[in-house]
Image (cartoon, rainbow, N blue to C red):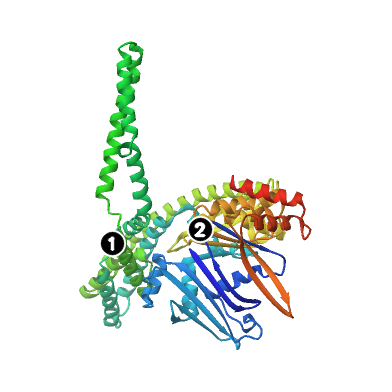
Amino acid sequence: MLSSLTIQDFVIVDKLDLHFAPGMSVLSGETGAGKSILIDALSLCLGARADASQVREGCERANITAVFELNPAAKAILDEQSIDCSEGEMHLRRAIESNGRSKAYINGTPVPASTLKELSETLIDIHGQHAFQTLAKPGEQLRLLDDFGQHNALIQATTQTYSRLRNSEKALKQAQSSQEDRAARLENLQWKLDSLSKVAPKAGEWETLSNDFDRLSHGAELIEGTQHASDVLSQNENALLDQLTQVIEKLSHLSTRDPALEGVVKTLSEGEILIREASYDLGNYLKHNDLDPDTLAEVEARMSLWHETARKLRIQPETLHTEMESVQAEIKGLEEGFDVEKLQKELTSARQAYETQAELLTTARKKAAQALSKRVTESMQTLSMQGGVFVVDVSGSEPSAKGSDTIEFRVAGHPGVTPQAIQKVASGGELARISLAITVNTVESTPVPTLIFDEVDSGIGGAVAETVGRYLRLLAANKQVLCVTHLPQVAAQGHNHFQVSKDISAQTTRSKIVQLESKARVEEIARMLGGQVITEATRTAAHEMIASANS
């Protein structure tokens, strides 16, 4: 999560120190006030290209620092660079000189800008006004579908079988060619094996580590919740079980006067037994769980070792076990000599295994494609595209580590029109709304914790704008969402509201950002509704919009 952003002498900003919270934060302001400057500054901390024009006029340099909470994927990158991250957060700083040269730092350690760019993929996802340009790329469409369908396990299995297939092909080709490079190959393979042996990866261990991390990172929430449940059931004064026992005793006595109550007593008594068992199980859970920081630290350390080794070998961490088996098998083959017939049989087996796994992935993708098509089509109806249709087409392609499928997003903006590839849709307004519909239905599946929407609501208004605002607020239930907007319907949905303004005095222009509370926020949304002249009617409408969003 993005915790804070400090900007100094950047474009028309002299000094800003912003702090961000979970949920949905919106930035609004008049045109030209510098709303997108914040996004530009943050992008520099994430590896974007620097330019001398970004330094405030008359200043020697611009400084931008973004602070993020640490996550395992980012930690693995920092560990490889030997950058200290013991405090559990990352300070990403970019300094731009007036001559255009720039320097990058992570927690005070100088790094190339490319390292910031690599880190950005684990931290943040920015969706701009022209997000549809990215959505038009086949690779991005495949990634979105796989994230939406949660195909990670299937892709990992497919990658492993593809690796086996390619290794089998290489082994056979090597056996059929000269053996001049055999010694060099053995040396390289032994280096790989030495690296892998330090990890000693086991089958299924990566999935176990990932699941353990997810569980342990929510340890406090699990303990607090189960303790509360235990207290309510049996530990508190007037606990549920105590009250239930009293009710049973009272009704048992009354049933001697009216047998019709005996059935009620029996049902309650059976329920009491089940509740006591549940209370006992909760107690055992609280006594014997492993939800402690030490266990979490062990899991994080193990995952970091996997990440570091995978990056060293330029493979995915989930394939370490398969890679080790493959390396061991190839070494054995080289050391024992070449058995072409045996290698041909292995290649046939490997090809069959890949085709079987790739078919499973294709089936899952087609199922996810139907679900995503349905959801995006439904969203289009709420974005003033009644009768519009969105289709995810899955067709065959050459085998690869990601399967044997080609994905194409197709759209029909109106009823009776044959869906075409998304990049062929002519209307800019339609493209913006379609890309927004796709984004809100797929972005929740992305692994990064922070999502930024930079005026993705451009070209819409009215009820459509209100729908967009609600979509973004729903996303903020599980992600940190930052949204630059000019629409009051969207701004009203935010949990936090920042106003960007431009101060012109003594021939100097400054952009400033302040967090709005209560009355100031009502005034800003009223301004967005009615322009410079704010009336009681616009104030009332603004207040109602905020109240409706929070209800």
Horizontal side of 174 relative to 29 (left or right) equals left
Q: Position of residue 299 (x, y in %)?
A: 31, 62
Q: Nearer the viewer, residue 352 or 313?
A: 313
User: Residue at label 1?
Assistant: 294
- The local secondary structure at tag 2 comes to loop
Question: Do we see residue 286 in this rendering?
Answer: yes
What is the spatial separation of the Cα atoms under label 2 and label 1, in whole angstroms? 26 Å
Image disc number at residue 508: none
Q: Residue furthest front?
A: 237
Q: Quadrant of residue 267?
A: top left
Of the residues shown, which amino acid type is indicated by label 1?
Asp
- Looking at marks 2 and 1 on the same chain, the residue that comes earlier in the sequence is marked by 2
Badge 2 amino acid: Pro
The residue most toward the left is: 336
Mark identifier at residue 22: 2
Circle 1 — which element?
helix
Relative to 7, say whether 551 is above or below. Answer: above
Nearest to the observer: residue 518 or residue 186: 518
